[in-house]
Amino acid sequence: MNRILFVGEHPKTFDVRWHSHEHWEMVYCTSGKGCFRFENGSQISYREGEVVVIPPHTIHSNVSDEGFTNIHITMADPAFRDKSAFRFFDDEEKNVGSAFAQAKYYYMGDLKHGDLVLAALGDLIASYIIVRRSNEGYSEPVEKLRSSIRRNYSRTDYALDETIRAMPFNYDYLRKLFKKEVGMSPLEYLTSLRMKSAQTLLTAMWTNEYSVAEVAQMCGYDDALYFSRVFKKYYGCAPRDFSKNKGKNEKNDQYRREFPEKDFE
């Protein structure tokens, strides 16, 4: 599954004639924009940073008035449930685009054992597509705000309000839209990520040496007292108590799994 069979690259192109492939085709637009046309009369428009995924034996063409460039991959047996072509946006970090570029490098290169990396990239690209496809229920502005929060939640200087106001949408409208689609407000979403990070840090075996203030900093809070209040409201106990009690139990459980021959009281 997810075996990359071919990787190609189009320089600036205006028209790709009608054709089909025996296997799945994935086309990442690296510049410009265009439109895929399908034999059944449907169309999918795309622009730079978007991917169009086309099922096997689907007759299609690709046209553009201004021209486009792309990287296209043919893959055998990816685990996609779709029966028709679809489009999705790359994330803010351009992870999908980076994976496509690496696939091109390893497919066209002559590195020893490069096929091992290419196989891993096939799994990675297929996984990216499945994840992005499963999150398509979010509108573009909500997904951009979610992405911004995920990238920056651990920064103490991250200003959520300023981020929302800087987006080309009405402030209240975007907050309401976010809550409608995500199920919580942007601030609640930010807090949930920070609290999940705090829980991980407080219970990890390798974080014993960190103080509550240091954990707060790593989770995006520059005020340890405020962090402690938020944490207690979220989990029902202070960070130090959470670390001593829950952390101790989880560490013992892990120790038992690693050293089952040991006796514990």
Image (spheres, rainbow, N blue to C red):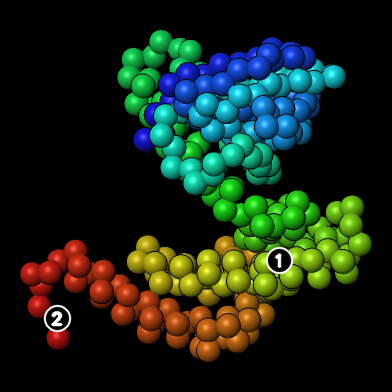
Residue 261: x, y in percent? Answer: 8, 69
Task: Report the residue at 66% width, 17% height from top.
Answer: 18
Q: In screen coordinates, is 168 left or right of 236?
A: right
Task: Report the residue at 48% width, 43% height from top.
Answer: 80
Q: Nearer the viewer, residue 120 or 46?
A: 46
Q: Nearer the viewer, residue 249 or 216?
A: 249
Q: Quadrant of residue 82?
A: top right
Q: In screen coordinates, is 208 left or right of 139?
A: left
Residue 264's tag is 2
Residue 224: x, y in percent? Answer: 62, 76
Q: In screen coordinates, is 151 left or right of 15?
A: left
Q: Which residue is mark 1?
A: 181
Q: Secondary structure at mark 2?
A: loop
Task: Report the residue at 25% width, 74% height from top.
Answer: 253
Q: Quadrant of residue 218?
A: bottom right
Q: Quadrant of residue 179?
A: bottom right
